[in-house]
Image (spheres, coloured by chain):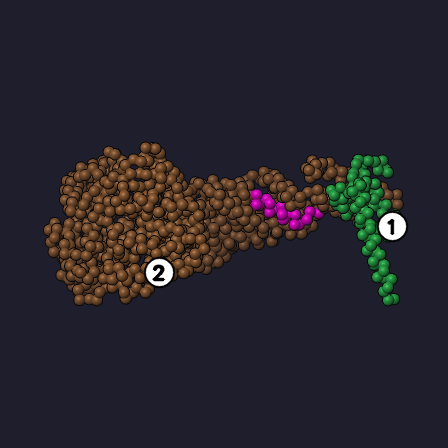
């Protein structure tokens, strides 16, 4: 997926709940590239123009799992706290 | 490994990034257009939503960089490019900084070599000296009023060495340079510096031999075959590194001595000195070399420093106490001291242990203050240079205002801009530093020659060492930051919109104010330097043109060493008469005077004087200078006898002892009395009435030209006091007949003057070597070398600063004129005359100068306090120097302002107004 597609994808999938600040995407992508979580190669955008396609690497996938599980743990924790909280 | 790959793939990454962002913007624009926006609106909206593109690209790239290092590298390349574009600016700055940094580095080289460097010996930190002050001549050691003991007799040294096991080794060395006559085979004898040292000297210092061996305790035993170690420096310069020197027999003071080795190459002795020893000779050889003048066995003749290596872990406080106690006990039982009444004052005597890793601090104590003062003065020069460069940077920054505003408007971070401008100024500083090193290399030799003229510089290295290079580099960095900080801050904090709107017209008020304040600072510092230079120069002139009480014109001083030629005391009268006769026979010689020492020689003799019927002076009494002279000496030096009679040839041998005294002597001892016929003695209790005063000579400066003429007495050099019984007194009486100087007053100076003098001397005895031969004027003037150095260097630095400040003012004023050309054109179009314009510009230029002058006065008054101890008959608030410095500065400022003011007045109003 290329940069702008990513922005739109996140926006659509989250039903406009999550809006990425467009500019901040690129520094984040570069840092993930550097860590080896992403790889990039030349490709063609949906409109037929050259762009760069970013794809998750194996290391990136592992990292994602870690992040997801830690996020789920935190979410579970928060949920429990909220559940017992007096209304 | 990965980072190397990343380094190579980075260029591709950056391209990828740009492509991605471009595509992002395009897709977004197209989408927005589909919603009905016009292409322009869509493009603007897309960009606005995205944010600051440049900044985001930069931040994204930073993921791949070592941010600090890389952006500095980029800044440096950018800076170099900028400087290449403005070569005149770059060269001006580099030259200004080169002068500032060069002056500082040159002075620091001296400070480092003389004051900061350790001796080139093994483990200098564990070396300690017994004592802390410098002593110039043979004394009893008791002369310091506070009881501080710094010098030791041989017997006292032996005693202390045996009683202090806390020292791994305790060595002794002669206090002053000991010039000796040196002859190899049948060569002509030359005079060279030597030092008597104890046998463990080299072992104590941890210095090995370059060739052969060093001295040992066996060499320092009475009766051992006489031996000596030669310095590497002397071996190379005097004997061209001839290997047969090692083991050869030389004649030192006409006595055969075997050279057992050459000391390590870099070793110059136990102190930084201007005339380092060429020979180190064991103390045991002293009686052989000095013959009847030996003082090795006299318990109260102190002529040795003691320096030792303390055992690790020894507490210094208790050790110092122990040595002091040992000293006091020894003084109380030693006959020579007991006789002089030591018991009364013995409790106050003590020894101060001082670190000796940098050697004995004689030269440091003499010149340390001056060197630090010079360092401070050169620091002021650098400050002025920095202010000047800061000003140039401000002017340049104002010119680049549009570029910088543009960059800020395009999203460049302020901090990044400041860093980049600082990089540029540090770069300039470093380039200035490099050029400064070249200035320093040349400058150090020049200053050294000025500071210590005629010295053999073995001990003072002028080649830049690691410490000096480090100093210059740090200084460059520091100055770069110093002169770059303010401009960078001011320039990067302008309002970009304002600057862009108004075009190149506005200099910005902040820039202008900063520039004016820098002129104020420059002016104040320049005033301080110029006024200081003025005071020191006036002081030097006062010293040079004072009344020494002597006639120096058409006179020459010859120093020689009869002891080195092997003369015994009983042969001296014949030698003096022979010299008198031979030199007197030269047609152009008017008078010949032979003396123990000539006026203003170093190492004048002094004695305590006792007068019959008055209380014993005691060991602490003020001493009186003494000289022994021939009858014609006073005429030869031009010192009039104002009462009584001069010496005659009948004041010789065992005739009744007579003396002449100076007016200051009369004032001190016989105020309001007739001194003629009065008697005094100079050998303590045994001869209080030995000498009869037969005449009074006018006061003359024999010792320190900065002090009033000293109280003095003169004795005939042909006369002996034969009634003495004390062995020390007899030895001193003999020693005081070994004349060291001859003064010739001449009718003319023929071309073959010097060769005639040498030939005549060789005609008396070929073993008599000339130590030096100078005009009396030169000999007197060389006493003022430190003052001359300070005056010349501060004058040099002052003029340097003046030039820098004037150029700075000129630059700033012309810049301001160019910025205000439209305003000036407008004024002229409205009827302002050229005179008015000139006045307008001059007022702008001279107001900060006037303020600087006003602020400079208190700076001068404070700074001059540090100079006061160097000033002779000049007050530290000397109004003349201050006025002259102020006038010179104002004059230079007027010229520097006048040129741009004239240019302003020549502005054509039509063209100036039409230029927009």
Residue B541 at least partly seen:
no
Nearer the observer: mark 1 or 2; the answer is: 2
Subunit of label 1: A
Tag 1 secondary structure: loop
Residue at 25% x, 56% y: name it: B606
Q: Position of residue B85 (x, y in %)?
A: 59, 38
Q: Position of residue B772 (x, y in %)?
A: 27, 42
Identify the residue under disc 1: A14
Asked whether B124 or B181 is in front, the reply is B124
- The chain drawn in brown is B
Is B796 on the left or on the right of B813, as rendered?
A: left
Q: Main secondary structure of the magenta part?
A: helix
Above-or-below relation of B675 to B233:
below
Asked if the residues shown at circle 1 and circle 2 are in contact, with their CB atoms under 8 angstroms apart, the answer is no
Point out which mark residue B563 bears. none
Is B108 on the left or on the right of A77, as rendered?
A: left
Residue at 32% x, 65% y: name it: B347
Above-or-below relation of B380 to B9:
below
Cα gap from disc 1 to disc 2, whole angstroms: 92 Å
Q: Quadrant of residue B578?
A: top left
Q: Residues within 10 Å of mark 1 (few under 14, many from 20)?
A: few
Point out which mark residue B324 bears. 2
Residue at 21% x, 42% y: name it: B566
> What residue span does the magenta drawing correspond to?
B411-427
Is B104 on the left or on the right of B298, as rendered?
A: right
Residue B414 colored magenta?
Answer: yes
């Amino acid at each position: 997926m290329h940069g702008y597609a990513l922005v739109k994808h996140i926006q659509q999938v989250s039903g406009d709940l999550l809006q990425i600040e467009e500019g901040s995407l690129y520094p984040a992508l570069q840092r993930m590239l550097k860590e080896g979580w992403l790889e990039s190669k030349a490709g063609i955008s949906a409109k037929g123009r050259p762009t760069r396609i970013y794809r998750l690497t194996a290391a990136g996938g592992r990292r994602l799992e870690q992040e997801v599980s830690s996020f789920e743990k935190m979410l579970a924790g928060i949920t429990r706290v909220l559940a017992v909280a007096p209304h | 490994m990965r980072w190397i790959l990343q380094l190579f793939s980075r260029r591709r990454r950056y391209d990828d990034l740009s492509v991605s962002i471009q595509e992002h913007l395009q897709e977004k624009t197209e989408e927005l257009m589909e919603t009905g926006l016009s292409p322009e609106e869509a493009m603007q909206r897309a960009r606005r939503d995205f944010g600051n593109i440049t900044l985001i690209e930069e931040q994204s790239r930073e993921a791949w960089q070592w941010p600090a290092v890389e952006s500095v590298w980029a800044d440096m390349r950018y800076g170099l490019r900028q400087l290449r574009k403005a070569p005149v600016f770059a060269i001006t700055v580099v030259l200004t900084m080169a002068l500032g940094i060069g002056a500082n580095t040159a002075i620091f080289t001296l400070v480092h070599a003389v004051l900061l460097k350790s001796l080139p010996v093994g483990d200098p930190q564990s070396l300690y000296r017994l004592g802390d002050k410098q002593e110039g001549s043979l004394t009893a050691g008791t002369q310091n009023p506070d009881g501080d003991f710094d010098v030791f007799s041989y017997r006292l040294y032996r005693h202390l060495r045996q009683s202090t096991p806390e020292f791994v080794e305790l060595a002794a060395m002669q206090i002053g340079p000991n010039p000796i006559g040196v002859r190899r085979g049948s060569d002509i004898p030359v005079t060279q510096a030597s030092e008597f040292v104890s046998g463990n000297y080299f072992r104590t210092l941890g210095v090995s031999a370059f060739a052969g061996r060093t001295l040992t305790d066996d060499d320092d035993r009475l009766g051992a075959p006489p031996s000596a170690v030669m310095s590497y420096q002397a071996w190379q310069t005097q004997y061209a590194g001839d290997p047969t020197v090692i083991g050869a027999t030389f004649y030192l003071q006409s006595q055969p001595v075997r050279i057992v080795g050459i000391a390590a190459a870099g070793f110059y002795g136990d102190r930084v000195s201007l005339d380092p020893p060429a020979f180190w000779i064991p103390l045991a050889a002293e009686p052989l070399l000095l013959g009847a003048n030996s003082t090795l066995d006299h318990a109260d003749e102190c002529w040795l420093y003691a320096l030792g290596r303390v055992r690790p872990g020894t507490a210094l406080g208790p050790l110092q106490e122990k040595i002091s106690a040992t000293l006091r006990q020894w003084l109380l039982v030693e006959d020579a001291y007991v006789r002089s009444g030591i018991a009364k004052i013995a409790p106050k005597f003590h020894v101060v242990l001082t670190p000796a890793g940098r050697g004995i601090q004689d030269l440091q104590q003499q010149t340390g203050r001056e060197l630090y003062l010079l360092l401070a003065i050169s620091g002021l020069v650098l400050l002025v240079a920095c202010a000047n460069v800061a000003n140039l940077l401000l002017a340049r920054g104002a010119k680049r205002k549009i570029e910088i505003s543009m960059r800020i408007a395009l999203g460049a971070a302020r901090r990044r801009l400041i860093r980049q401008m600082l990089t540029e100024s540090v770069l300039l500083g470093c380039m200035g530093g490099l050029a400064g090193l070249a200035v320093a290399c040349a400058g150090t030799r020049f200053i050294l020659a000025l500071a210590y003229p005629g010295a053999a510089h073995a001990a003072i290295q002028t080649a830049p060492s690691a410490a000096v290079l480090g100093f210059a580099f740090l200084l460059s960095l520091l100055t770069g930051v110093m002169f770059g900080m303010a401009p960078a801050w001011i320039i990067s904090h302008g309002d970009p919109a304002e600057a862009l709107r108004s075009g190149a017209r506005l200099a910005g008020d902040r820039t202008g104010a900063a520039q004016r304040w820098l002129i104020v600072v420059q002016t104040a510092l320049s005033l301080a330097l110029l006024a200081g230079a003025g005071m020191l120069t006036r002081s030097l002139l006062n010293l040079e043109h004072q009344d020494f009480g002597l006639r120096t014109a058409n006179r020459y001083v010859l120093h020689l060493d009869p002891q080195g030629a092997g003369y015994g005391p009983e042969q001296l009268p014949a030698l003096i008469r022979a010299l008198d006769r031979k030199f007197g026979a030269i047609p152009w010689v008017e008078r010949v005077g032979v003396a123990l020492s000539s006026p203003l020689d170093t190492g004048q003799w002094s004695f305590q004087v006792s007068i019959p019927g008055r209380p014993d002076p005691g060991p602490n009494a003020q001493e009186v200078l003494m000289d022994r002279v021939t009858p014609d000496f006073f005429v030869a030096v031009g010192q009039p006898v104002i009462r009584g009679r001069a010496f005659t040839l009948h004041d010789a041998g065992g005739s009744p002892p007579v003396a002449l005294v100076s007016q200051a002597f009369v004032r001190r001892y016989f105020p309001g009395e007739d001194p003629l016929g009065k008697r005094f003695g100079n050998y303590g209790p045994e001869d209080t009435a030995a000498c009869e005063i037969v005449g009074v000579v006018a006061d003359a400066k024999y010792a320190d030209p900065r002090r009033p003429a000293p109280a003095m007495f003169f004795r005939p050099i042909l006369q002996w006091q034969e009634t003495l019984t004390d062995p020390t007194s007899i030895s001193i009486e003999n020693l005081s007949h070994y004349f060291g100087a001859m003064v010739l007053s001449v009718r003319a100076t023929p071309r073959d003057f010097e060769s005639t003098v040498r030939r005549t001397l060789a005609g008396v005895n070929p073993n008599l070597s000339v130590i030096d031969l100078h005009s009396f004027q030169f000999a007197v003037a060389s006493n003022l070398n430190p003052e001359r150095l300070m005056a010349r260097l501060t004058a040099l630095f002052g003029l340097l600063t003046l030039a820098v400040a004037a150029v700075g003012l000129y630059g700033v004023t012309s810049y301001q004129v160019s910025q205000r050309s439209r305003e000036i054109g407008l004024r002229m179009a409205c009827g302002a005359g050229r005179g008015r314009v000139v006045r307008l510009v001059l007022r702008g230029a001279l107001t900060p100068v006037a303020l600087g002058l006003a602020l400079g006065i208190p700076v001068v008054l404070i700074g001059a306090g540090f100079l006061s101890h160097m000033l002779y008959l000049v007050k530290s608030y000397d109004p003349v120097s201050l006025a002259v410095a102020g006038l010179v500065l104002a004059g230079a400022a007027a010229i520097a302002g006048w040129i741009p003011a004239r240019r302003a007045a020549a502005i054509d109003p039509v063209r100036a107004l039409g230029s927009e």
